[in-house]
Image: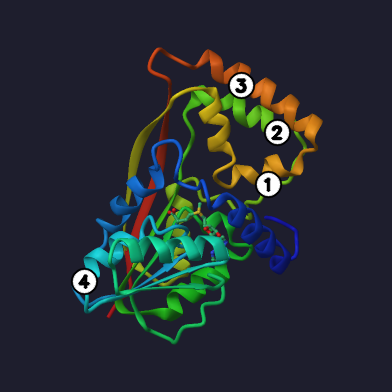
């Protein structure tokens, strides 16, 4: 559990996601945009549905939800990062989606009325909530009877990259994660706290290809890993970069660097 003040932690998260937004999901094959539709495919969505996408980022799940809900539906994306919200809004506009509304809002305090949503979606973000139980209570409150909650989180990393955790562990930097959701049991526990049953679980994998070490380094700045890097002074960061790139180089093949990412997914339904 992260011991920092929840409000301060959320501001900090909003800040580094604001700075990551220009490159977020733009390197390493845009894998969030590959996995987002795979989560949405697990929800039974009817045309005209109202969907809330909590911590929507740039819209990896928001956009497929909007496409599925049709022009009669409404999809509300919320995120603490203003730049993510701006980007998701621009993304929806570019796709010609008129059923999307995006707002800066805390996922643990949804400014929404009770039972307004047919589905609540949350992709790769539960571990950022300082009080996951508050988030679960909010998801339960806004979900209508018979509605669905769909979650994704990162599973265990490819063993070949274990050196990365060891290297980061030696840096003495703070982690931004408040909790660990890297197993199906934790996702199931969250869904039970959100008062849904009939839980279905699954795993999706995606292999991303990076051209070289430089692209690997650019990628590390494009998501929450950025927070670790921002805590290092210039010398420590140079040392970390040199050490990490030495490892990355050994993993490079003729066609670049391949990394397989495993996403855990879980979906549950609220009784009618
Ligand atoms: C890894 S990204 C995932 C974004 C998106 N769901 C996707 O699949 O690409 C995590 C997102 O969670 C947002 N976030 C973190 N804490 C939040 C909170 N308390 N309320 C709302 N959004 C939050 C961040 O700003 C960031 O956009």
Q: Which mark is residue 245?
A: 3
Report, in whole angstroms, how far the alpha carbon at label 4 lies from the one at label 2: 46 Å
Q: Is residue 32 above or below residue 160?
A: below
What residue lies at 22% left-to-right and 65% top-to-bottom?
68
Q: Nearer the viewer, mark 4 or mark 2?
A: 4
SS class, disc 4: loop
Q: Nearer the viewer, mark 3 or mark 2?
A: 3
SS class, disc 3: helix
The residue tagged 2 is 169
Report, in whole angstroms, how far the alpha carbon at label 1 lies from the one at label 3: 21 Å
What residue lies at 50% left-to-right and 45% top-to-bottom?
182
What residue lies at 59% left-to-right and 18% top-to-bottom?
247
Q: In x, y percent, where is residue 71?
A: 22, 75
* Structural crowding at the residue carrying mark 4, measured as other residues with C-alpha within 10 Å and reported as few (<14), some (14–19) or many (≥20): some
Q: Which mark is residue 70?
A: 4
SS class, disc 1: loop
The residue tagged 1 is 175
* Structural crowding at the residue carrying mark 1, measured as other residues with C-alpha within 10 Å and reported as few (<14), some (14–19) or many (≥20): few
Q: In x, y percent, where is residue 13?
A: 64, 58
């Amino acid at each position: 559990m992260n011991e920092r003040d929840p409000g301060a932690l959320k501001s900090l998260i909003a800040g580094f996601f604001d700075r990551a937004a220009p490159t977020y999901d733009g390197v390493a094959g845009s894998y969030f945009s590959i996995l987002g539709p795979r989560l949405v495919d697990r929800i039974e969505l009817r045309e005209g549905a109202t969907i809330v996408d909590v911590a929507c980022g740039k819209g990896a799940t928001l956009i497929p939800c909007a496409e599925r809900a049709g022009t009669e539906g409404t999809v509300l994306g919320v995120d603490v990062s203003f730049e993510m919200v701006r980007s998701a809004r621009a993304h929806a506009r570019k796709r010609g989606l008129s059923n999307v509304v995006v707002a800066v809002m805390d996922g643990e305090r949804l400014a929404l009325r009770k039972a307004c949503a047919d589905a609540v979606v949350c992709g790769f973000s539960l571990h950022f909530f300082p009080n996951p139980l508050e988030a679960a209570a909010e998801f339960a409150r806004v979900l209508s009877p018979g509605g669905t909650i769909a979650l994704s989180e990162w599973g265990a990393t490819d063993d070949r990259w274990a050196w990365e955790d060891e290297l980061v562990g030696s840096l003495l930097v703070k982690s931004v994660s408040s909790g660990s959701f890297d197993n199906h049991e934790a996702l199931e526990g969250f869904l039970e706290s959100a008062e849904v049953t009939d839980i279905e679980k699954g795993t999706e994998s995606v292999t991303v290809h990076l051209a070289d070490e430089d692209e690997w380094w650019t990628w590390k700045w494009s998501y929450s890993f950025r927070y670790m890097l921002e805590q290092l002074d210039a010398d420590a960061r140079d040392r970390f970069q040199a050490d990490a790139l030495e490892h990355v180089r050994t993993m490079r093949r003729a066609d670049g660097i391949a990394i397989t990412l495993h996403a855990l997914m879980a979906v549950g339904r609220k009784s009618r």
